Amino acid sequence: MNEVAIQSDGVATPDFKKIKKKQQLIRFLKGILFLMPSIILFAVFLFYPLIRTIYLSFFLTDASGSTTVFVGLDNFINMFSSPVFRKSMQSTFLFVIFTVPGTVLIGLFLAILANEKLKGIGFFRTIYSSTMGISVAAGSVFWLFLFNPTMGWLNEILNFFGIEAIGWLTDPSWALLSVSITTIWMNLGFIFLILLGGLQSIDSYLYESAEIDGASYFYKLRRITIPMLSPTLFFVITVSLINAFQTFGQIDMLTSGGPQNETNLIVYSIYQEAFMNYQYGTASAQAVVLFVIILVLTFIQFKLGEKKVHYQ
Amino acid sequence: MNQVELINVSKSFDKQQDILNDINLSIKKGEFFVLVGPSGSGKSTLLRMIAGLEDITDGIIKINERAVNHLPPKDRNLSMVFQNYALYPHLTVEQNILFGLRAKKVNKQEQQKRLNETCQMMEISNLLKRKPKELSGGQRQRVALARSVVSEAPLCLMDEPLSNLDAKLRAHMRIEIKRLQKRLGLTMIYVTHDQVEAMTMGDRIMVLNNGRIQQVGDPITLYNKPANLFVASFIGSPKMNMGKAVFSDQHLIIEDDLHLPKESIKSAMISETKNITVGIRAEHILPAEDSGVTHELTVVNVEQLGNETLISFEIGKELWTAKWLGQWNVHTGDKLPVHISADNISFFDSNSGRLLEASSTEKEEVLAI
Amino acid sequence: MKIPLRRKVIFYILLVVSAFLVFAPALIAFMMSFMTNQDIMSGKLIPTTITFDNYLAVFERFPLLNYLLNSFIVSIVIMIGQLMLSSLAAYAFVFMEFKGRNFLFFVFISTMMVPFEASVIPNFQTIRDLNLIDSYAGLTLPYFAMAFGTFLLRQNFKQIPKELKEASEIAGMGHFKFYLSVVLPMAKTSLITLGVYGFLTSWNMYLWPLLATTNDSVRTVQIGLKQLQTQEQLNEWGVIMAGGIIVVIPTLILLFLGQKRLQQGLAEGAIK
Ligand SMILES: Nc1ncnc2c1ncn2[C@@H]1O[C@H](COP(=O)(O)OP(=O)(O)OP(=O)(O)O)[C@@H](O)[C@H]1O
Ligand SMILES: [Mg+2]
């Protein structure tokens, strides 16, 4: 009986190693199948363009964008020595410095206000997040009127206080600031929503125990709210930074990069170079610079984000 | 006939080696087999390997005499009940129960027939249209059981299915599951960390610790003849009283405290072993009235359970507990005369932990019934 | 927690003032869209007479309805595409085990480092070479794959107990069926959140439709608004504002309905 069993086992027992290998392959193929659509699209619309952009940046091109002459690093050298590009970089960084702290601080202020458990708070939350639903084009149109030198409300208000009218979008010393204000307003809704979400995920028992200890409002804000919110804040800052570097629509609608290239931010500069001047090579060189900036920023986010900041 | 057979089975994870070692086991058809062991001993892992949810690192698992190492769970013809029941929250009770049959494309009539039978058996016919979150813990448990029953798989695996229930319901469900298993003739492999559950439900029990089999046997054997110190202390409640023991000229001295006359110990093997640990069950530290005072012990704690009384004493560094039937008016600090007989003591080798000799009286007690 | 009255009053004042400041640009535009040109020119704050002429004018002089429809189609298509691709990918990352999964996940993360704006030149060429300029496909395809959506859904799928998957394996249910009949229904709220987010961002897209459309056939309403603004010049603000209001109404409604969900969902996806 025993012998028979062993014999039949010898026949019946399959080669598990082989089968395991095959099953692993099948599992792999199934996994790839689920990821395939995303992978293909990422490859076509993200990774290929990335390589292509770097490739193009070493060439001159014709009007359709085909490469003509290999110029090595000339595009980059010309770019960095070009006053227009340097101006563009300067404006971009200034713009970032204006908008990022502005958006985050105002967003934080609104989120803290709207996190209070008061009657009708839902209404205020909706209002504060509303700019997320207002497109760049529509928002630009709204502000275009406010900035209007003769009829615009901003100048009317100045007028009311006896202050001289300002060429918000036409005066080189004001244009970048005006665009920044518009941008802060536009990005506020999104940043507000995320910060509010972060605030609401803070455990309420933290506040309750502080309450029992008799902590003041601002003490709680400084010692509980801000430290607990730090991962969200960190995320929001990085997102705003990346968004700021990619700003395009409001420039196109409000100033078209003017006056005197004051608001010629980097994406607008790429757009003009590529699609107005048909200089795909130099435009690509600029795009490479933009890519490097974003790369560094995202990288910092991942590196620091891992540690989950909880400053005390 | 063996329903399930494990031959030299072992398991390692990438991050952790030797979760299970050299498991050899056969489970007979229609048997209620309990896997018991402390948390992290590898019970779930072993069960999941049988189910096909976990890779087998080494060895062979056979179901119905057929090696199944390479088969996915669905081809092993078994059902499983999970600790958290694994009910689909968005499906009604009916859809949950029929989930497996629909996946296997059993025809509609057959589905309905089995559903009706099962629901009647489990007494859940009135819950069919509800969602799991509208059920009590016990009802969820029943639905999970029903889902397993309806599959009509001959082998059923359960991983701590009662641990989310309160004590009363648990006691009730223990009986119900056991009855269900017998009635349907299922082969059951049941995982628990609760030795009471193991003792009350299992036809046979396997005690697992650190990924190694400690002992396999029926409940009474495990209780009376624990193969080693681990099983001795794991099985039984309250826990078996233990202590280090040495031989002097005339005495066996336990924890430098209790003295027992040496001549009462017959086995020569025990006297030859250097380091001895002795164990005695709580019910074998007897009230002295019955059979003469052997020792006077100071009471350090008393637990009144109503039908019985648990009394603790300090023996050297160890805390021993006696279990006396009925209600006893004793207080902490009292000096209590007790009777301890060497016949009731089990002897273990302290180094290997192995049993040297089991207590002798217990066998007689069992036979006497 | 009880809030003292004095603090309550301060909060309400701050809330109201901030709300007014934040909403003012939209509110002004809203009022202007009902004003006559004369009212606007004379710098009135509140319209003396309410008129719908601006709305009539903008629909008459402009293929606005056509643009709205285009935007609607484009946004819906992108939304559905994103939901499908993200949920499939998230499913693979959560419920499937295979060699190279971690590497592929890293690839997905790395896509966050490539800004669409920086790769717009080759993308334009690709779409042009595929003859997809002025087509819905050209407008939508580049946006289907989405790392953020994949992460958000992955976070959510991870909360589905793995026993549910195992129970389905024992029952003999395959991956795709489990994905359809268990995972998607259970993740409904997250899918809605992501859908709302996807619709909002697609509706508001600017740079890509500007490049990928050359005529009215598939042009979206955002680009239409830009044209309206450049063509109408400065005198007819009422008409421009009417256009602007029409553009923002669908998204504002969506936002008002889904604000709570968005806020929870985005926070979840943003911070693990
Ligand atoms: N996927 C895994 N990867 C690495 N180690 C694991 C994995 N799953 C389980 N382990 C380890 O295997 C050991 C046994 O785990 P198992 O879940 O089988 O224990 P258990 O006996 O069921 O315990 P419990 O009673 O707590 O459920 C544990 O030490 C656990 O840490
Ligand atoms: Mg377990």
Image (tube, coloured by chain):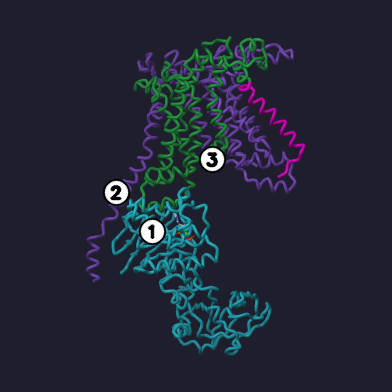
Chain colours: A purple, B cyan, C green
Q: Amino acid at mark 3?
A: Glu
Corner quadrant of residue B66: bottom left
Q: Is residue A60 above or below residue A292?
A: above
**Residue B200: image location, x then y, percent:** 47, 71
**Do the residues at pointers 1 and 2 share their chain?**
no
- Element marked by disc 2: helix
Disc number placed over residue B150 in the picture, else none: 1
Disc number placed over residue B133 in the picture, else none: none
Q: Amino acid at mark 1?
A: Val
**Residue B165: image location, x then y, percent:** 53, 61
Taking B369 as reference, is B259 left or right? Answer: right
Host chain of mark 1: B
Disc number placed over residue C268 in the picture, else none: 3
- The quadrant of the rendering that contains the N terminus of chain B is bottom left
Q: Amino acid at mark 2?
A: Lys
**Of labels 1 and 3, the one closer to you:** 1
Q: Residues within 10 Å of mark 1 (few under 14, many from 20)?
A: many
Which residues are the magenta region? Answer: C1-27
Q: Is residue B195 above or below residue A99?
A: below
- Element marked by disc 3: helix
Separation of disc 1 and disc 2 at Cα? 33 Å
Q: Does residue C22 show up magenta in the picture?
A: yes
Separation of disc 1 and disc 3 at Cα? 39 Å
Q: Residues within 10 Å of mark 3 (few under 14, many from 20)?
A: many
Separation of disc 3 and disc 2 at Cα? 38 Å
Name the residue that disc number 2 marks.
A22
Q: Is residue B291 above or below residue A149?
A: below
